[in-house]
Image (spheres, rainbow, N blue to C red):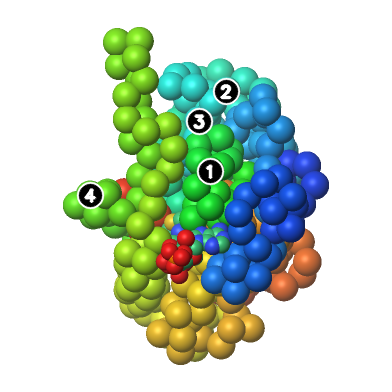
Amino acid sequence: MIFSRIAGTGGFLPGSPVSNDDLVARGIDTSDEWISERTGIRTRHLVETGVTTSQLASEAARRALDAAGVAATEIDLLIVATTTPDMIFPSTACLVQNVLGVPAGATAFDVQAVCSGFAYALAVADKFVKSGSHKRALVIGAETLSRIVDWKDRGTCVLFGDGAGAVVLVADSEPGILATALHADGSQSPILNATGSISNGVITGSPFLHMDGQSVFKMAVRVLGDVALEVLAAASMQIGDLDWLIPHQANIRIMKATSKRLGLPDEKVVVTVDRHGNTSAASVPLALDAAVRDGRIQRGQSVLLQGVGGGFTWGAALLRF
Ligand code: ACO
């Protein structure tokens, strides 16, 4: 039987950390106290004008390939999860393929599930690898959310950051990825969206992200708890079997409410939202990479990755690292 497992991780954050006080200095009517108390965010990284999602994705991917000891020329599947692609088309995945030198003829496409994007992309790649059709996949979550936040809306602009995280997923005779689950509820699209589009040469809808924060908060806590129990049950595991939980890094209060509901000690939850802000599809692979590189996550440990975001979408992947 063929399984997939993560052979290496990588992450990339642009520029220097931008603190909450730096945002105040840039003229945003907010405070370090308001942001850190409500969200846990202290710093985030923001791209300079002109820096693209594919550039961040390529850098994170190079680091994941190095960590895995896999050459770009050996990759046969490349999936980029992003909601801030460089352009309508080609896909960000095709742009990254060209930059990295992933061979012509490989499979490359984007997945759009906003902050659940990495969970979606990883689950899709797992199914490709398990089917035997592909052997070495690059799965990337990359975003430049700062391009689509309204810097005049203090209720949203303070929450987001830019960055990219990546994993190399390889075929193996031992499991790796133990269970995945993906869900969506399109009826909830009004609570979190960016409706902008181009039609007949005219921009329609809003170019900015809009969010009903309290509705998102309630929905996120409910579905993150449910999907954690779902993948654990699918793998015949209990909460107590988990070594690490890596939830989408949107807000420390959502993470604490989820771990409390699951009865999981806070020490088992990987937190990077304080340093990265909410990087949407990049948040989970960035947090995974941080915890692997600082030695917390060790080979053989059980790790639960979770995404939740616009759509509404949510998903999880349970793995033996
Ligand atoms: N600085 C200072 N004051 C602010 C700011 C700010 N950055 N933003 C809003 N306020 C003010 C508001 O104007 C309001 O003032 P008022 O009472 O005088 O009218 C007050 O703070 C409360 O505003 P609310 O929007 O009601 O604040 P709330 O307590 O709901 O907190 C927050 C907002 C942090 C966004 C919260 O709703 C939340 O955590 N939601 C979860 C959503 C989330 O994390 N989304 C991330 C993206 S989605 C995802 O990744 C799944």
What's the residue type where badge 4 is placed? Gly
Left or right: residue 79 versus residue 189 is: right
Front residue of 143 and 146: 146
From the image, state whether disc 1 or disc 3 is nearer to you. Answer: 1
Residue 237 at x, y = what percent? 42, 81
Tell me the element at label 3: loop
What is the crowding at mark 3: few (fewer than 14 residues within 10 Å), some, or many (at least 20)?
many
N-terminal-most mark, 3 or 2:
3
N-terminal-most mark, 3 or 4:
3
Tell me the element at label 4: helix
The alpha-carbon separation of the residues under discs 3 and 2 comes to 10 Å
Determine the residue positioned at 51% across, 79% down: 256
What's the residue type where badge 3 is placed? Pro
From the image, state whether disc 3 or disc 2 is nearer to you. Answer: 3
What's the residue type where badge 2 is placed? Leu
Q: Count numbered badges in the picture.
A: 4
Front residue of 155 and 237: 155
The alpha-carbon separation of the residues under discs 2 and 1 comes to 32 Å
Tell me the element at label 1: loop
Residue at far top of view: 201
Residue 306 at x, y = what percent? 46, 63
Left or right: residue 178 versus residue 276 is: left
- Which residue matches tag 2? 95
Quadrant containing the C terminus is bottom right
N-terminal-most mark, 1 or 3:
3
Question: Toward which corner of the image does residue 49 lie, by quadrant?
Answer: top right
Q: From this viewpoint, is residue 275 visible?
A: yes
From the image, state whether disc 2 or disc 1 is nearer to you. Answer: 1
